[in-house]
Image (tube, rainbow, N blue to C red):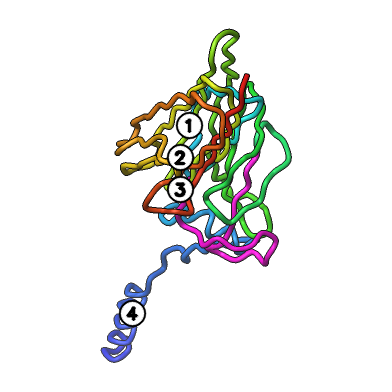
Amino acid sequence: MNLKNLIMISAFFLLLGCINLGEPSKQISFSDSENLQDLNNTDRPSIRLITPVSTIIKTNQDTYDVEITFHYSGISPKPPGTKSEMGEGHFHIILDNGKRIETMDNFYMLKNVKPGNHILQVELVKNDHSSFIPKIFDTSNFYIIKDVQKFGFKNYQVEIHKFFFKPAELELKVGDSVKWSNKALGPMTVVSSDGSFSSGVIPPSGQFVHTFKKEGTYEYRYPLYPSMSGKIIVKNK
């Protein structure tokens, strides 16, 4: 073997050693491209119930209007039933495994909920109503108790929220009392239109009580928001 051939063979083996003979890179395939969003844990959507919390709710009425609020992230709300797109979705609200309520808003008022034990579930779903994998939801277990006074005068409850009173109207008898509780984050005020009562400043979580001693219709409001008003109808026994 001459020197020229020896040099060529050496160069061949040197080139062969520089070639990457490792395993080929692996690829992941997905049968459903929408599941790519489900598997991205970094930007995974989330949902968290704010109200009602797991608690006992007392009322002197036969039913109670339950205010549902929740926080969400990672999606842009779209109308239910539209084409499913990554980064979009809406919400399913289900009380006691009943009929689902579909909404784009993170606020909803459940009307006329009866006393008893209740389980509330709020789920974040895709536009076509299908669940994310795994499901994205939050639950609350609350109990409504009808608090009835068998003797004497009755005490009624009104909650003050940022833009409304709940309930906005009450009917009671002479001698009964109403307690306003501030559920808003800032100070609030209750003022009657006829000047018969005024709460002054009610701090967050504070209360104001007034006893109605005369028959009549008493309209009241929050002075800074004239459209935020309520009504008390007082009748003789």
N-terminal of the pair, mark 4 or mark 3, is: 4
Query: Is residue 33 placed above or below 118 in the rendered structure?
Result: below
Whether the residues at callouts 3 and 1 have beta carbons within 8 Å, the answer is no
N-terminal of the pair, mark 1 or mark 4, is: 4
Q: Would residue 85 be counted in the magenta stretch?
A: yes
Q: CA distance from mark 4 to mark 3?
A: 61 Å
Would you name the residue on which mark 1 appears?
A: 53
* Neighbourhood count class around disc 3 (C-alpha, 10 Å): few under 14, some 14–19, many 20 upward: few
**Percent x, y for residue 14?**
30, 77
Q: CA distance from mark 3 to mark 2?
A: 7 Å
Q: Which residues are magenta?
A: 69-94
Residue at 68% x, 58% y is: 128
Would you name the residue on which mark 3 appears?
A: 71
Q: Would residue 84 be counted in the magenta stretch?
A: yes
Query: Mark 3: which secondary structure?
Result: strand
Would you name the residue on which mark 2 appears?
A: 50
The answer to which quarter of the image holds residue 11 is bottom left
Would you name the residue on which mark 4 appears?
A: 15
* Neighbourhood count class around disc 2 (C-alpha, 10 Å): few under 14, some 14–19, many 20 upward: some
Q: CA distance from mark 4 to mark 2?
A: 66 Å
Residue at 55% x, 42% y is: 137
Q: CA distance from mark 2 to mark 1?
A: 7 Å
Query: Mark 4: which secondary structure?
Result: helix
* Neighbourhood count class around disc 1 (C-alpha, 10 Å): few under 14, some 14–19, many 20 upward: some
132, 11: nearer the viewer? 132
Q: Say what amino acid the circle numbered 3 marks.
A: His
